[in-house]
Amino acid sequence: MSALATLLAQAPFLDPGGGSDQAGRVSVRTFATILAAGFLIAIAGHIVRSRVLVAFGIALVFGATVFVPAVLALLN
């Protein structure tokens, strides 16, 4: 867990003290919220056996961990 915290602290596009109002910086809470929502939706999709919900949850997790940071890195 400490390794994850270290990696997040070194990421140039994250600013734990700021919000999304800063130019080119996004709050860690934004990523954590999208990530948690993706996991919860995917779990709910498995419970009700809905492939659409599972796919949407996986897409949210992918977006929060890969797509959004990549786009932010390219824009900066």
Image: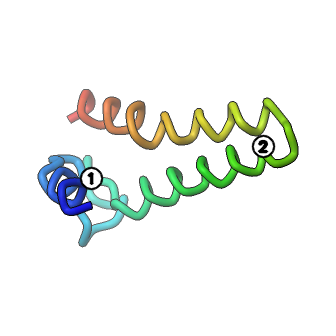
Secondary structure beneath label 1: loop
* Mark 2 vs mark 1, CA separation in Å: 32 Å
24 or 69: which is nearer to us? 69
Residue at image coords 34%, 65%: 19
| Callout 1 crowding tier (Cα within 10 Å): few <14, some 14–19, many ≥20 | some
Question: Residue 56 sits in which quadrant?
Answer: top right
Residue on which the image places disc 2: 45
Indicate left or right for 21 with 37 as reference.
left
| Mark 2 or mark 1, earlier in chain | 1
Residue on which the image places disc 1: 25
Residue 38, label in figure: none
Residue 74 image point, x, y percent: 25, 27
Q: Nearer the viewer, mark 2 or mark 1?
A: 2
Residue at image coords 79%, 31%: 52
Indicate left or right for 38 with 14 as reference.
right
The number of discs equals 2
51 or 63: which is nearer to us? 51
Residue at image coords 20%, 62%: 2
Question: Residue 16 sits in which quadrant?
Answer: bottom left
Q: Amino acid at mark 2?
A: Gly
Secondary structure beneath label 2: helix
Residue 28 image point, x, y percent: 34, 60
Q: Amino acid at mark 1?
A: Arg
Give the quarter of the figure containing the N terminus: bottom left
Indicate left or right for 67 with 45 as reference.
left
| Vertical order, 37 against 48 (above or below) | below
Question: Residue 5 sits in which quadrant?
Answer: bottom left
| Vertical order, 50 against 26 (above or below) | above
Residue 41 image point, x, y percent: 70, 49
| Vertical order, 45 against 4 (above or below) | above
